[in-house]
Amino acid sequence: MKSLGLIFVALIGAAGVLSIAGWWIGPQLVQIALLDERRDQPYLLLDFVKTSGEQDEAYLLSHYQQPLTGLIASEGGVPVGAYTLVQLFEGTRADEWSHLNNFHLSRAQDLAQVMTSSPYRIIAGNGRVENFTLGHFSAQAVRWRAGLVIWLVRASEHVAVDNLAPVLATLEGTSGRLVWDKAAHIYHREQDWDRLVVLDFPSAEDALNWMRDPEVATARVIAGAKARRSMVAVYGRADRR
């Protein structure tokens, strides 16, 4: 069997990028597959998902959640959190991802194996389910707490300072904590976020209370004005896996 590196080299040489039924392998994924010095490092994957049309929770669970979890487990990955959307504070209707799955893989090359497989194309290519996946290298499979604030940012080219610093400063003295702040490896062509920030709280209600605090609300408005665009949402842990 050919190595992943040879397969990707062949794909790049043939077409530059690969598009199958609307599903796109981005340059970040190719980079993970080809960079030998990082392919054995652990990786954290966040998968945002929602159903289209009249599909319900049962359909999402049976046709997406369970198959995806099984596929990732077949490559040694483990689910470390499943969340549902509580409230979208900033963003468009397209940013209303109803569910969030958090997976940890012991090696980045296992992620490449999953996302280039035929089963994944079938799962992610389901026309009744939409997904958006991103991630970054992470040494630990830490389970975040029950309430999350997810902040995706597309930075402005004209702002050199960290526009989220004043927002994050308001965490001091609260039950919230910064658990993730990294560049985002994006695996979908239509998404152009370049930074992912995750805050966790003991509960979704705690996260909502922090978001609604007047000082935080003011800092959010200022931060949003300095970004090209942003998506901010509160998620709560789901009972299912």
Image: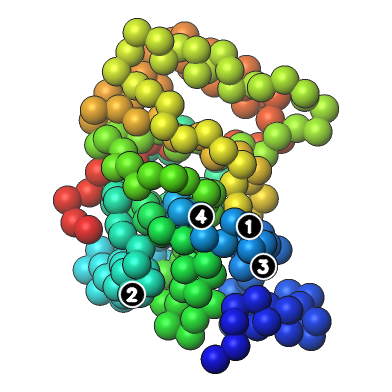
- Closer to the chain start, of discs 4 and 2, is 4
Residue at far left of view: 239
When the figure is inspected, residue 187 is found, relative to residue 123, above or below; the finding is above
Frontmost of labels 2 and 3 is 3
The residue that disc 3 covers is: 34
Q: Quadrant of the C terminus?
A: bottom left
The image shows residue 78 at horizontal and vertical percentages of 31, 60
Measured Cα–Cα span from mark 3 to mark 4: 13 Å
Label 1: few (<14), some (14–19) or many (≥20) C-alpha neighbours in 10 Å: few
> Image point 22% across, 68% down: which residue?
58
- Closer to the chain start, of discs 3 and 4, is 3
Measured Cα–Cα span from mark 4 to mark 2: 18 Å
Residue 188 position by quadrant: bottom right
Task: Determine whether, in the image, residue 7 is placed left or right of residue 111.
Answer: right
Frontmost of labels 2 and 1 is 1
The residue that disc 4 covers is: 41
Label 3: few (<14), some (14–19) or many (≥20) C-alpha neighbours in 10 Å: some
Residue 166 position by quadrant: top right
